[in-house]
Image: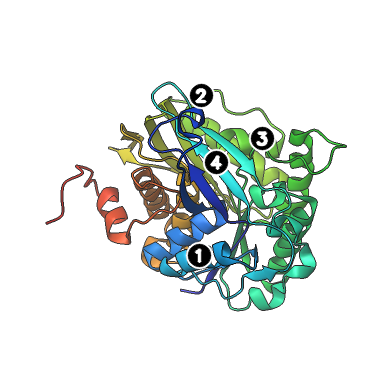
Amino acid sequence: MKPIVCFGEIMARLQSPGHLRFRQVMPGTLELTFAGAEANAAVTIAALGGEARFVTALPRHELAEACLANLRAARVGVEDVVHADTGRFGLYFVEAGANQRGGNVLYDREGSAFCRAGPEAYDWPRLLRGASWLHTTGIAAAVSREAAEATLAAVAAARTAGVRVSFDINHRRKLWRWDSAYAPEELAQRTLARILPSVDLLIGNPGDLAHAAGVAPPATGAEADEGPAALSALARAVVAKFPTVRRVAIGLRDGVSATHQRFGALLYAADEDRAWLAPTVDGRYRPYEIGQVVDRLGTGDALAGALLFACETPELSAPETATGFAAAASCLAHSIHGDFNYVTRAEVEALQRGGNGGGVSR
């Protein structure tokens, strides 16, 4: 398998223990792990047995070195990380939700090394040499003007080099503040309009995809009789607006509560004008019932990473198989604490085959 290059910011994730609220634990102890949408996807690819290279900009200090060591331990290539002389390490704070109380994320990223690094910081012709895909997200473009221009340069360089581009919209309403002339939603739409004409695989939830395509989101879920047709129509609308997009992947989430989720996925192939849903039972969509969510952050990135891995693995690359594989990997990510999805290919394939009893391997 050729390497998959993932580009974006990685941060320190600081979380209150268990389901405690910030006011209950501070002053006190927060748990620190590392996280970022594109790094999360890279870890999934590597955990499944693929080759992932991560590109970002980090400051020169011990925390950044600890982060890189963590990625190396996950078998992610970090040789191409830019070591910046200015800028800080980005942070985000997590308060886990429970039952009907949703989770909360606070970002502290302004002025980070990644936010300050413009397109001139990255030698994309060299960084993309030999790669099969470039994977990045809307988060990379949302954090600063410089990062948005760097993301645009990365996508353009991949197009020039013949490297396919995977893009997860990953809309974050608390970001997209770097141009006060536009409201965040408008700034996001204007920036995505410059990126998406160079994308081959577009990933998102129904709302984000509808916003990008300028259409109304489907009114029904995938389980409704008209749901698959409505989701396919949404994917066609995306392809009609951005003809370079040949596949559209949609994460399908029905949140019963913060700790009870139903999850599945749809993959639409433009060349065949056909969509596949997963998981299915007797040919009908039946989402995974995740009744005890351990951590839902990073699960969409697990979907993206697993889908890219499947696309590059011949025996998994058929659309129906790839959809099921990606949905199963994302389901399992809900069982892992932290953003990184440390599950194996064997575990994903066992769930894909229906081995979902949660037994102990002895």
Up-down relation of residue 129 to residue 175 (above or below): below
Q: Could you tell me if the residues under marks 3 and 1 are in contact, i.e. CB atoms within 8 Å? A: no
**Coordinates of residue 93 in the picture (x, y in percent):** 55, 41
- The residue that label 1 is drawn on is 66
Q: Amino acid at mark 3?
A: Arg
Instruction: Note whether 120 is above or below 344 in the view shown.
Output: below
The reply to whether the C-beta atoms of the residues labelled 2 and 1 are less than 8 Å apart is no
Q: Amino acid at mark 2?
A: Thr
Q: Give the spatial CA distance, label 2 vs label 1.
A: 45 Å
Disc 2 crowd rating (10 Å Cα; few below 14, some 14-19, many 20+) is some
Instruction: Identify the residue at the far right of this view.
Output: 181
125 relative to 277 in the view: left or right: right
As measured in the structure, the alpha-carbon distance from the residue carrying label 2 to the one carrying label 3 is 23 Å
Q: CA distance from mark 4 to mark 1?
A: 18 Å
Mark 3 and mark 1 lie on one chain; the one further toward the N terminus is 1
Label 2 vs 1, first from the N-terminus: 1
Mark 2–mark 3 CB contact (< 8 Å): no
CA distance for labels 4 and 3: 16 Å
- Graded by Cα atoms within 10 Å as few (under 14), some (14 to 19) or many (20 or more), the crowding at tag 3 reads few
Lower sequence index among marks 2 and 3: 3
Which residue is disc 4 drawn over?
A: 93
Secondary structure under tag 1 reads helix
Q: Secondary structure at mark 2?
A: loop
Q: Amino acid at mark 4?
A: Phe
Secondary structure beneath disc 4?
Answer: strand
Q: Which is nearer the N-term, disc 4 or disc 1? A: 1
Pointer 2 residue: 220
Q: Residue at x 50, y 34 (%)?
A: 26
Q: Is residue 83 left or right of residue 336?
A: right
